[in-house]
Amino acid sequence: MASRILGLVREQVLAHAFGASHQMDAFNVAFRLPNLVRDLFAEGAMTAAFVPTFSRTLERDGRDAAWRLGSRAITALLVVTVLIAAVGIVFAEPMTRAFAADFAQVPGKFELTVWLTRLMFPFLPLVAVAVAAMGMLNALGRFFVPALAPAMFNVASIACIVLLVPLMPGFGVAPVTALALAVLAGGLGQVLLQWPQLRREGFRYRFDLAPRDPGLREILLLMGPGTLGVAATQFNVYVNTVLATSQQAGAVSWLNYAFRIMYLPIGLFGVAIASASLPLMSQHAAREDMPALRQTLSHAVRLVLALTVPATFGLIALGVPIVRVIFERGHFLPTDTQSVALALMGYAPGLVGYSAVKVLSPTFYALRDSRTPVIVSVTAVLMNALLSVLLARWLGFVGLSLGTALASLVNACLLLVLLRRRLGPIGIMRLASTLVRITVASAVMGAAAWGLHEWLAMHVIAGHGFVAQVVRVGGSITVAMVVLVLMARLLRIEEFDEASSNVLRRLRGRRAVKETRD
């Protein structure tokens, strides 16, 4: 929870310092380039392939064998990501031209993007080690420190904005350069935070490049199709980035701010539940205990629905006031608020899909099937790209966020159908019942939140002061939560109470998905 709150504070500080300016657009595109490669080789496919293999090795061969596998995986990642970072630094200019050729129309914007890209590529080996450490700790049932690690990135960003932004012009560089330095500091901080915990568990890293290791080869084989799937996703990111840079100035930043708001519930609910459920499902798969695997999967998906559907309606109902409270100050203007809120409304329907995919896709990797999620991912990405191109013509940058949301829902539905075919009955009717009831409860909650906020703004707490805005938003959210709890009790949505309790346990560092007998 601390990481998510700090993430919002980071975005507030960014919005105050840079708004939706040319510098912020340049940083967002520049960070997207190393981020693309990070997702390709470090976080996406690596996490899905590494955690099940490490869990099986730990279960069958003990800790010593698991530690050897961990060292070899980190070594392989370091070799690959250092080479990629070097290539990225050398070829930053043509890469930037492929993503943001239109930036050349603004004097200095393209050159700034190239400079920031080169500065941030060394982030790759740092985050690769951090992701491997996170995977090992999660497989060992240690969730608190890995969940806290992303907070280091946000702390570094906030500190660099406050301390370094005013100093950058004195060194002859743009103030936004401080953000690139923060990225590097944040990556290093994530490693340093997790490493002592790993050592306490008994891990001792040594440089060990052993390509013939069966476990490492299994990780690489699983990563192959997984990397292809992530590559397809990144192709869609490429399409959206190109389309956004061709929209009006600020569109890249508007979409980024909106997605950051939406990622708060994704990270709090979807990623948290997935991080806790994947090691458990990997253990069930290693023991070939399919009934337990089905029960854990169904349970995790119901928890996702119970938490993300209300969040979706809440973001739609209170999008404008939430954006205004979080961002509207300094260089972030009222027109930026309206634009970010529109982008947020486009993204919001995809919250359920994004979070569900975080649980569903790794299940295939636990079953040692990396092809199916790749095929589904490619299908969803092609649909996303097509929808983005079509909707951007009619809705501008909002069409990009809406296309992404619709494609994520398709992705989740396809994965769920294919898992049912693979595993057998996973309680589809119970899932559907939970979805219908939580949707009804959330719709009532959303209507109550919107109506109360409008009434407060017109009759009780008028004005545009920050305190008045916070009171209106806070009061509306509080009443909305009360309405949701009452509706959940009325409709007998037991998953909502359970999901809320599990999130609280997750925030305290304990397992958020328990084995249940449904």
Image (tube, rainbow, N blue to C red):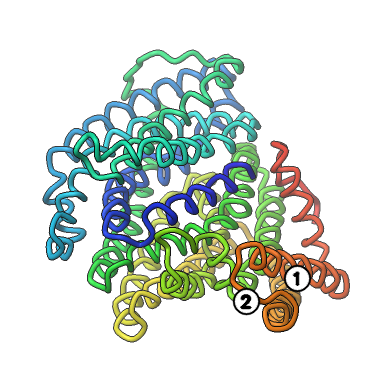
- Residue type at the position of mark 2: Ala
Question: In terms of secondary structure, where does tag 2 sit?
Answer: helix
Quadrant in the rendering for residue 126:
top left
Instruction: Give the residue at the far bottom of this rendering.
Output: 394
Decide if residue 316 is on the left or right side of residue 472: left
Residue 479: give x, y in percent of width and height. Answer: 79, 70
Q: In the rendered view, would you say 328 is above or below 11? A: below
Q: Residues within 10 Å of mark 1 (few under 14, many from 20)?
A: many
Q: Which mark is residue 317?
A: 2
**Position of the N terminus by quadrant:** top right
Query: Where's residue 160, x and y in %?
Result: 40, 37
Q: Which mark is residue 480?
A: 1
Question: Three-letter amino acid code at disc 1?
Answer: Ala
Q: Position of residue 340 (x, y in %)?
A: 45, 69
At a point 64% along the width and 31% down the height, the residue shown is 142
> Local crowd at mark 2 within 10 Å, few (<14), some, or many (≥20)?
many
SS label for mark 1: helix
Q: Foreground: 268 or 23?
A: 23
For the residue pair 225 and 448, the one nearer the viewer reads as: 448
Residue drawn at x 66%, y 62% as measured from the top left: 467
Left or right of 167, for residue 329: right
Residue 425: in sight, yes or no? no
Relative placement, left or right, of 392 versus 408 is left
Q: Nearer the viewer, residue 287 or 57?
A: 57
Can you tell which quarter of the image residue 421 is in? bottom right
Residue 373 appears in which quarter of the rendering? bottom left
Q: Which mark is residue 72?
A: none
Q: Are marks 2 and 1 in contact (CB under 8 Å)?
A: yes
The location of residue 106, given as percent across then percent down, is: 15, 63
Quadrant containing the C terminus in the rendered view: bottom right
- x 32%, y 55%: residue: 24
Residue 108 at least partly seen:
yes
